[in-house]
Image: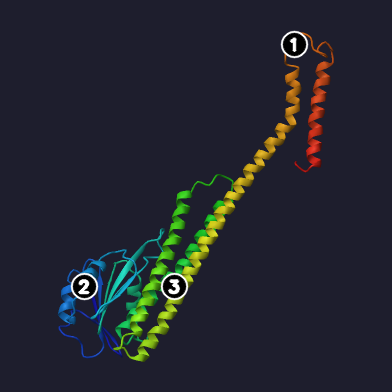
Amino acid sequence: MNIFHIDQQSVHRLDTLPKEVPSSGYLWLDFTRGEQHNLFETVKQLCQVDIHERHLEDQVTVNHPSAFDSMYDYDFLVFRSVKSIHMPQLQTDSCAFFLIDDFLISVHNPEDEAIPTVVKRLSMTHRRIPQYPEALLEMILDTKVDQFLGVRTLMGESLARWQNKLLTHNKPFKNWDEIMEFKGDIQTIRTLCEEQEDVLRNWRYSIRTDVALDRQVVEHLNINLSDISEHIRRVLRHAQKLESDLEALLQLHFSIISNQTNEVMRVLALMSSIFLPTTLVTGIFGMNFIKMPGLDNPHGYDFTLVGMIGIAISLIIFFKLKKWL
Protein backbone atom coordinates (compact mmCIF):
# COMPACT_ATOMS: atom_id res chain seq x y z
CA MET A 1 0.00 0.00 0.00
CA ASN A 2 1.21 3.50 -0.86
CA ILE A 3 0.12 6.39 1.35
CA PHE A 4 0.39 10.00 0.22
CA HIS A 5 -0.44 13.17 2.08
CA ILE A 6 -1.16 15.90 -0.47
CA ASP A 7 -1.56 19.54 0.43
CA GLN A 8 -1.43 22.77 -1.55
CA GLN A 9 2.35 22.94 -1.65
CA SER A 10 3.74 19.41 -1.65
CA VAL A 11 3.20 15.67 -1.80
CA HIS A 12 4.51 13.51 1.05
CA ARG A 13 4.82 9.74 0.96
CA LEU A 14 4.01 8.29 4.37
CA ASP A 15 5.41 5.05 5.75
CA THR A 16 2.42 4.30 7.96
CA LEU A 17 -1.22 5.21 8.00
CA PRO A 18 -1.88 8.24 10.23
CA LYS A 19 -4.13 7.67 13.21
CA GLU A 20 -6.25 10.71 12.45
CA VAL A 21 -7.26 12.82 9.49
CA PRO A 22 -4.68 15.53 8.62
CA SER A 23 -5.73 19.08 9.41
CA SER A 24 -4.82 20.24 5.88
CA GLY A 25 -4.81 18.62 2.48
CA TYR A 26 -6.04 15.08 1.88
CA LEU A 27 -4.82 11.48 1.83
CA TRP A 28 -4.40 9.15 -1.11
CA LEU A 29 -4.39 5.46 -0.14
CA ASP A 30 -3.21 3.38 -3.08
CA PHE A 31 -3.80 -0.37 -2.80
CA THR A 32 -2.65 -3.15 -5.11
CA ARG A 33 -5.09 -6.01 -5.53
CA GLY A 34 -4.15 -8.75 -3.11
CA GLU A 35 -3.11 -6.39 -0.33
CA GLN A 36 -6.44 -4.63 0.20
CA HIS A 37 -7.79 -7.32 2.56
CA ASN A 38 -7.74 -4.78 5.39
CA LEU A 39 -9.36 -2.04 3.32
CA PHE A 40 -12.67 -2.18 5.17
CA GLU A 41 -11.04 -1.89 8.59
CA THR A 42 -8.73 0.90 7.42
CA VAL A 43 -11.54 3.01 5.99
CA LYS A 44 -13.84 2.41 8.93
CA GLN A 45 -11.12 3.31 11.43
CA LEU A 46 -9.77 6.41 9.70
CA CYS A 47 -12.70 7.78 7.72
CA GLN A 48 -15.57 6.71 9.96
CA VAL A 49 -17.38 5.40 6.89
CA ASP A 50 -18.94 2.00 6.27
CA ILE A 51 -18.36 0.77 2.73
CA HIS A 52 -21.20 -1.21 1.20
CA GLU A 53 -20.55 -4.93 0.95
CA ARG A 54 -21.32 -4.97 -2.79
CA HIS A 55 -18.69 -2.29 -3.42
CA LEU A 56 -16.13 -4.32 -1.48
CA GLU A 57 -16.89 -7.25 -3.78
CA ASP A 58 -16.78 -5.11 -6.93
CA GLN A 59 -13.38 -3.58 -6.15
CA VAL A 60 -11.85 -7.08 -6.05
CA THR A 61 -13.19 -8.04 -9.50
CA VAL A 62 -10.40 -7.69 -12.05
CA ASN A 63 -12.56 -7.06 -15.13
CA HIS A 64 -15.55 -5.38 -13.55
CA PRO A 65 -17.30 -3.10 -16.08
CA SER A 66 -16.91 0.63 -15.63
CA ALA A 67 -19.48 1.87 -13.13
CA PHE A 68 -20.29 4.75 -10.82
CA ASP A 69 -22.33 4.71 -7.63
CA SER A 70 -22.92 7.68 -5.37
CA MET A 71 -23.62 6.86 -1.73
CA TYR A 72 -24.43 9.13 1.18
CA ASP A 73 -20.89 9.02 2.64
CA TYR A 74 -18.78 8.33 -0.42
CA ASP A 75 -18.63 7.89 -4.20
CA PHE A 76 -17.58 4.57 -5.71
CA LEU A 77 -16.13 4.49 -9.23
CA VAL A 78 -14.83 1.62 -11.34
CA PHE A 79 -12.92 2.47 -14.51
CA ARG A 80 -12.13 -0.35 -16.93
CA SER A 81 -9.57 0.23 -19.65
CA VAL A 82 -6.88 -1.49 -21.69
CA LYS A 83 -4.29 -3.12 -19.45
CA SER A 84 -1.38 -2.23 -21.73
CA ILE A 85 -1.21 -1.18 -25.38
CA HIS A 86 2.16 -2.96 -25.67
CA MET A 87 0.69 -6.45 -25.22
CA PRO A 88 0.30 -8.71 -28.31
CA GLN A 89 -3.37 -9.27 -27.48
CA LEU A 90 -5.88 -6.75 -26.20
CA GLN A 91 -6.47 -7.25 -22.47
CA THR A 92 -8.48 -5.16 -20.06
CA ASP A 93 -8.54 -4.59 -16.33
CA SER A 94 -10.30 -2.23 -13.97
CA CYS A 95 -9.36 0.22 -11.24
CA ALA A 96 -11.67 0.91 -8.31
CA PHE A 97 -11.80 4.28 -6.55
CA PHE A 98 -13.46 5.48 -3.36
CA LEU A 99 -13.98 9.22 -2.86
CA ILE A 100 -14.52 9.88 0.85
CA ASP A 101 -14.37 13.53 1.92
CA ASP A 102 -10.62 14.19 2.27
CA PHE A 103 -9.59 10.76 1.00
CA LEU A 104 -9.02 9.06 -2.31
CA ILE A 105 -8.64 5.29 -2.18
CA SER A 106 -7.52 3.44 -5.31
CA VAL A 107 -7.36 -0.32 -5.90
CA HIS A 108 -5.63 -1.61 -9.02
CA ASN A 109 -3.69 -4.52 -10.48
CA PRO A 110 0.12 -4.64 -10.11
CA GLU A 111 0.48 -4.26 -13.91
CA ASP A 112 -1.40 -0.95 -13.97
CA GLU A 113 0.62 1.71 -15.81
CA ALA A 114 -1.43 4.82 -15.03
CA ILE A 115 -0.96 4.92 -11.25
CA PRO A 116 2.89 4.86 -11.36
CA THR A 117 2.75 7.56 -14.04
CA VAL A 118 0.61 9.79 -11.80
CA VAL A 119 2.90 9.16 -8.82
CA LYS A 120 5.87 10.19 -10.95
CA ARG A 121 4.09 13.36 -12.06
CA LEU A 122 3.25 14.27 -8.48
CA SER A 123 6.92 13.95 -7.53
CA MET A 124 7.90 16.61 -10.08
CA THR A 125 8.21 19.96 -8.34
CA HIS A 126 7.15 21.98 -11.40
CA ARG A 127 3.88 20.08 -11.78
CA ARG A 128 0.69 21.60 -10.44
CA ILE A 129 -0.53 19.60 -7.45
CA PRO A 130 -4.21 18.53 -7.40
CA GLN A 131 -5.79 20.50 -4.58
CA TYR A 132 -8.62 18.06 -3.76
CA PRO A 133 -9.30 14.31 -4.15
CA GLU A 134 -11.66 14.79 -7.10
CA ALA A 135 -8.90 16.59 -9.02
CA LEU A 136 -6.48 13.73 -8.31
CA LEU A 137 -9.01 11.16 -9.51
CA GLU A 138 -9.60 13.25 -12.63
CA MET A 139 -5.82 13.29 -13.18
CA ILE A 140 -5.64 9.48 -12.90
CA LEU A 141 -8.53 8.99 -15.32
CA ASP A 142 -7.00 11.48 -17.74
CA THR A 143 -3.73 9.50 -17.66
CA LYS A 144 -5.59 6.27 -18.32
CA VAL A 145 -7.48 7.75 -21.26
CA ASP A 146 -4.29 9.28 -22.69
CA GLN A 147 -2.73 5.81 -22.66
CA PHE A 148 -5.94 4.47 -24.17
CA LEU A 149 -5.53 6.88 -27.11
CA GLY A 150 -2.46 4.89 -28.16
CA VAL A 151 -4.76 2.02 -29.07
CA ARG A 152 -5.84 3.93 -32.19
CA THR A 153 -2.39 3.74 -33.78
CA LEU A 154 -1.90 0.06 -32.96
CA MET A 155 -5.33 -0.93 -34.24
CA GLY A 156 -4.79 1.10 -37.41
CA GLU A 157 -1.49 -0.69 -38.02
CA SER A 158 -3.18 -4.04 -37.43
CA LEU A 159 -5.87 -3.19 -39.99
CA ALA A 160 -3.17 -2.29 -42.54
CA ARG A 161 -1.51 -5.69 -42.00
CA TRP A 162 -4.81 -7.50 -42.47
CA GLN A 163 -5.45 -5.47 -45.61
CA ASN A 164 -2.18 -6.67 -47.13
CA LYS A 165 -2.98 -10.28 -46.24
CA LEU A 166 -6.58 -10.19 -47.45
CA LEU A 167 -5.83 -8.47 -50.75
CA THR A 168 -2.77 -10.57 -51.60
CA HIS A 169 -3.99 -13.76 -53.24
CA ASN A 170 -0.76 -15.62 -53.90
CA LYS A 171 -2.07 -18.24 -51.49
CA PRO A 172 -5.46 -18.84 -49.86
CA PHE A 173 -6.21 -16.82 -46.73
CA LYS A 174 -6.58 -19.12 -43.71
CA ASN A 175 -6.18 -16.84 -40.66
CA TRP A 176 -9.89 -16.41 -40.08
CA ASP A 177 -9.64 -17.09 -36.35
CA GLU A 178 -7.11 -14.27 -35.95
CA ILE A 179 -9.12 -11.76 -37.94
CA MET A 180 -12.25 -12.63 -35.93
CA GLU A 181 -10.20 -12.02 -32.79
CA PHE A 182 -9.17 -8.63 -34.18
CA LYS A 183 -12.82 -7.83 -34.87
CA GLY A 184 -13.62 -8.84 -31.30
CA ASP A 185 -10.91 -6.46 -30.04
CA ILE A 186 -12.56 -3.59 -31.91
CA GLN A 187 -15.91 -4.44 -30.33
CA THR A 188 -14.22 -4.57 -26.91
CA ILE A 189 -12.83 -1.07 -27.44
CA ARG A 190 -16.29 0.20 -28.38
CA THR A 191 -17.73 -1.36 -25.24
CA LEU A 192 -14.98 0.18 -23.09
CA CYS A 193 -15.61 3.63 -24.55
CA GLU A 194 -19.36 3.43 -24.00
CA GLU A 195 -18.87 2.28 -20.40
CA GLN A 196 -16.33 5.01 -19.69
CA GLU A 197 -18.58 7.70 -21.14
CA ASP A 198 -21.45 6.54 -18.94
CA VAL A 199 -19.24 6.67 -15.84
CA LEU A 200 -17.97 10.17 -16.57
CA ARG A 201 -21.47 11.41 -17.35
CA ASN A 202 -22.81 10.03 -14.04
CA TRP A 203 -19.86 11.41 -12.08
CA ARG A 204 -20.27 14.85 -13.65
CA TYR A 205 -23.94 14.83 -12.69
CA SER A 206 -23.02 13.88 -9.13
CA ILE A 207 -20.46 16.69 -8.99
CA ARG A 208 -22.95 19.27 -10.26
CA THR A 209 -25.49 18.26 -7.63
CA ASP A 210 -23.01 18.10 -4.74
CA VAL A 211 -23.71 21.20 -2.64
CA ALA A 212 -20.59 20.60 -0.54
CA LEU A 213 -18.28 21.35 -3.48
CA ASP A 214 -17.22 24.88 -4.31
CA ARG A 215 -18.73 26.16 -7.57
CA GLN A 216 -15.29 27.00 -8.96
CA VAL A 217 -14.18 23.45 -8.24
CA VAL A 218 -17.28 22.11 -9.98
CA GLU A 219 -16.62 24.22 -13.09
CA HIS A 220 -12.97 23.16 -13.18
CA LEU A 221 -13.88 19.47 -12.91
CA ASN A 222 -16.61 19.78 -15.52
CA ILE A 223 -14.20 21.31 -18.03
CA ASN A 224 -11.54 18.66 -17.44
CA LEU A 225 -14.02 15.78 -17.49
CA SER A 226 -15.45 17.14 -20.74
CA ASP A 227 -11.96 16.98 -22.25
CA ILE A 228 -11.58 13.38 -21.08
CA SER A 229 -14.98 12.51 -22.55
CA GLU A 230 -13.95 14.03 -25.87
CA HIS A 231 -10.81 11.86 -25.91
CA ILE A 232 -12.95 8.80 -25.25
CA ARG A 233 -15.29 9.77 -28.08
CA ARG A 234 -12.29 10.10 -30.40
CA VAL A 235 -11.32 6.50 -29.60
CA LEU A 236 -14.95 5.42 -30.05
CA ARG A 237 -15.21 7.12 -33.45
CA HIS A 238 -11.93 5.51 -34.50
CA ALA A 239 -13.16 2.08 -33.38
CA GLN A 240 -16.39 2.56 -35.34
CA LYS A 241 -14.39 3.56 -38.43
CA LEU A 242 -12.10 0.54 -37.99
CA GLU A 243 -15.10 -1.76 -37.73
CA SER A 244 -16.59 -0.25 -40.89
CA ASP A 245 -13.26 -0.46 -42.74
CA LEU A 246 -12.76 -4.08 -41.68
CA GLU A 247 -16.25 -5.00 -42.86
CA ALA A 248 -15.60 -3.29 -46.21
CA LEU A 249 -12.23 -5.07 -46.44
CA LEU A 250 -13.86 -8.46 -45.89
CA GLN A 251 -16.51 -7.69 -48.50
CA LEU A 252 -13.77 -6.64 -50.95
CA HIS A 253 -11.86 -9.86 -50.22
CA PHE A 254 -14.93 -12.01 -50.93
CA SER A 255 -15.66 -9.95 -54.04
CA ILE A 256 -12.14 -10.55 -55.36
CA ILE A 257 -12.40 -14.28 -54.61
CA SER A 258 -15.78 -14.37 -56.35
CA ASN A 259 -14.37 -12.54 -59.40
CA GLN A 260 -11.45 -14.95 -59.56
CA THR A 261 -13.83 -17.90 -59.40
CA ASN A 262 -16.02 -16.37 -62.09
CA GLU A 263 -12.97 -15.81 -64.29
CA VAL A 264 -11.95 -19.45 -63.94
CA MET A 265 -15.48 -20.60 -64.74
CA ARG A 266 -15.61 -18.27 -67.75
CA VAL A 267 -12.38 -19.68 -69.17
CA LEU A 268 -13.58 -23.24 -68.60
CA ALA A 269 -16.91 -22.44 -70.26
CA LEU A 270 -15.16 -20.97 -73.32
CA MET A 271 -12.86 -23.98 -73.56
CA SER A 272 -15.88 -26.27 -73.36
CA SER A 273 -17.60 -24.25 -76.09
CA ILE A 274 -14.55 -24.56 -78.32
CA PHE A 275 -14.08 -28.29 -77.85
CA LEU A 276 -17.77 -29.22 -77.82
CA PRO A 277 -18.16 -29.27 -81.68
CA THR A 278 -14.91 -31.20 -82.09
CA THR A 279 -16.07 -33.66 -79.46
CA LEU A 280 -19.32 -34.05 -81.38
CA VAL A 281 -17.43 -34.82 -84.60
CA THR A 282 -15.22 -37.31 -82.77
CA GLY A 283 -18.28 -38.96 -81.26
CA ILE A 284 -20.00 -39.29 -84.63
CA PHE A 285 -17.04 -41.02 -86.25
CA GLY A 286 -16.56 -43.17 -83.18
CA MET A 287 -19.97 -44.87 -83.39
CA ASN A 288 -18.37 -47.93 -85.06
CA PHE A 289 -21.02 -48.48 -87.72
CA ILE A 290 -19.91 -50.82 -90.51
CA LYS A 291 -20.79 -48.36 -93.23
CA MET A 292 -20.39 -44.60 -92.73
CA PRO A 293 -19.80 -41.91 -95.39
CA GLY A 294 -16.15 -41.04 -95.63
CA LEU A 295 -14.78 -44.03 -93.75
CA ASP A 296 -13.37 -45.51 -96.94
CA ASN A 297 -11.82 -42.22 -98.06
CA PRO A 298 -8.01 -42.45 -97.75
CA HIS A 299 -7.89 -38.75 -96.76
CA GLY A 300 -10.87 -38.90 -94.37
CA TYR A 301 -8.72 -38.54 -91.25
CA ASP A 302 -6.93 -35.50 -92.68
CA PHE A 303 -10.16 -33.82 -93.76
CA THR A 304 -11.77 -34.46 -90.38
CA LEU A 305 -8.76 -33.16 -88.44
CA VAL A 306 -8.55 -30.01 -90.57
CA GLY A 307 -12.29 -29.47 -90.17
CA MET A 308 -12.06 -29.81 -86.39
CA ILE A 309 -9.16 -27.34 -86.25
CA GLY A 310 -11.08 -24.96 -88.50
CA ILE A 311 -14.12 -25.12 -86.23
CA ALA A 312 -11.97 -24.41 -83.17
CA ILE A 313 -10.23 -21.46 -84.87
CA SER A 314 -13.55 -20.06 -86.08
CA LEU A 315 -14.97 -20.20 -82.55
CA ILE A 316 -11.87 -18.53 -81.13
CA ILE A 317 -12.16 -15.71 -83.68
CA PHE A 318 -15.87 -15.39 -82.90
CA PHE A 319 -15.17 -15.14 -79.15
CA LYS A 320 -12.46 -12.58 -79.80
CA LEU A 321 -14.84 -10.44 -81.85
CA LYS A 322 -17.38 -10.66 -79.03
CA LYS A 323 -14.58 -9.77 -76.58
CA TRP A 324 -15.28 -12.88 -74.57
CA LEU A 325 -11.60 -13.78 -74.80
Q: Amino acid at mark 2?
A: His
Vertical side of 31 occupied by 169: above or below = above
- Camera sees residue 120: no
Vertical side of 61 occupied by 172: above or below = above
For the residues marked 1 and 2, what is the alpha-carbon distance in whole angstroms? 101 Å
Q: Nearer the viewer, mark 3 or mark 2?
A: 2
| Mark nearer the N terminus (3 vs 1) | 3
Question: Which residue is disc 2 drawn over?
Answer: 52
- Residue at (61%, 49%) from the top-left corner? 256
Question: Which residue is disc 1 drawn over?
Answer: 289
- Residue at (56%, 56%) from the top-left corner? 249
- Camera sees residue 172: yes
Q: Amino acid at mark 1?
A: Phe
Badge 2: residue crowd in 10 Å (few <14, some 14–19, many ≥20): few
Q: Nearer the viewer, mark 3 or mark 1?
A: 1
Q: Nearer the viewer, residue 117 or 211?
A: 211
Q: Nearer the viewer, residue 256 or 18?
A: 256
Vertical side of 208 occupied by 90: above or below = above
Q: Left or right of 291: which side holds 112?
A: left
Query: In the rendered view of the protein, which quadrant contains the N terminus?
Result: bottom left
For the residues marked 3 and 2, what is the alpha-carbon distance in whole angstroms? 29 Å
For the residues marked 3 and 1, what is the alpha-carbon distance in whole angstroms? 85 Å
